[in-house]
Image (spheres, helix red, strand yellow):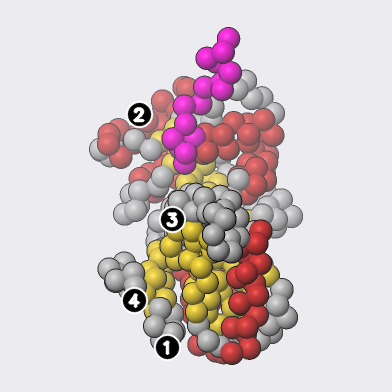
Amino acid sequence: MPYETCLLMVNCFQQLAQALAYGPTVLATVTSVRGSVPREVGAKLVVDVNGQAFNTIGGGAGEAKVLRQAKEVLQTGHKQFVDIDLSGTPQGQTQGICGGHMRVWLERWQGEAAKFLVQTILHQLHQGQSVTLVTPLDGVHDPYLADEPVSVDAAIAFVETLEPPPTLLIVGAGHVGIQLAKVAALIGFQIVVQDDRPEWANPEHYPQASQILTGEVEGAIAALAAHQNLYAALVTRGYTYDLDALQQLLQRLIPCRYIGMIGSEKRVRQVYGAIAQAGIAKERLANIYGPIGLDIGALTPEEIAVSISAELILVQRGGTGRSLSEGLR
């Protein structure tokens, strides 16, 4: 699941939780698609007790049809499918000309059980753990969480694994870290900051952070042990801090997707040398990027933050880092 989709999913369930606080809420979920359509399977729309909608399943006449039915489901509680015809064919009533079809499941969520389920989903996603949500399509049973991915006939239930958005652990809360948190948050990362200096690591400097950890780096990394989508940027004030953090990160049972180290080539080589002496296998170093960032001539903390964030996107997307105009020159 692309990371912006992961973030949208978290936002959707946050909106669902807020809506449930005021009364019954309909969750519309795209369960199947065919041909060219505006949204993917799993896309969601929340409709609150007042009929106000949050998120989108593609807009236009198709979404308007879903909204009309959702208001009916709010009243009756009758779970149902809505079929959206985007074929643009002259026969029948179509809702668009994209060329495909979408099937959307509408279900009313309400009560304490629904609130607890949503909070459980959000808690696990914020802890960096994936969640398997099973939505029975029999019109009788309610959605539930499975302990592990399950295989169920698509005609019986809709099963989706919700992935956590990527988390960026910024080790070192100095000038570069402050700017990096701003840019990384904009591109969809949850931000966690570690530094033993509370005068630097605080909400005033890091309003984007979901966690600010002012203890030792070992404890901070241990607190993130269950995160399945962890990135780390080592932007500390010295070589020994880099080495301490890197040793802890390389011992994680769930490998980091990315570890970047700031500093000169000499500083990075010193860290590599110390790691080699510690007997850590070379294959564990595959996800280390040092010196950190892409070569764009960055000098200021703001420019360095852009350079690092560009490398984060490259790792996520699998790009090349080349100029897009290179082939035309």
**Picture layout, residue 5 above or below residue 245:** below
- Around disc 1, counting alpha carbons within 10 Å, would you say few (fewer than 14), some (14 to 19), or many (20 or more)? few
At horizontal 64% and vertical 72% (from top left) the residue drawn is: 67
Which residue has dot 3 on it? 34
Residue 115 left/right relative to 274: right
**SS for tag 3?**
strand
Can residue 21 be seen from the camera position used here? no
In the image, 107 versus 10, the foreground residue is 107
Which residue has dot 1 on it? 140
What residue occupies the far front of the structure in this picture? 91
What stretch of residues is rendered in magenta?
314-329
Nearer the N terminus, badge 1 or badge 3?
3
Q: Quadrant of the C terminus?
A: top right
Q: Amino acid at mark 4?
A: Ile
At horizontal 44% and vertical 41% (from top left) the residue drawn is: 258
Residue 273 left/right relative to 310: left
Q: CA distance from mark 1 to mark 4?
A: 11 Å
Asked whether 24 falls inside the magenta stretch, the response is no
Which residue has dot 4 on it? 156
Q: Amino acid at mark 2?
A: Gly
Nearer the N terminus, badge 2 or badge 4?
4
Which residue has dot 2 on it? 273
**Picture layout, residue 86 above or below residue 292:** below
Q: Amino acid at mark 1?
A: Val
Instruction: Give the label, 1 or 3, closer to the camera.
Output: 3
In the image, 197 versus 190, the foreground residue is 190
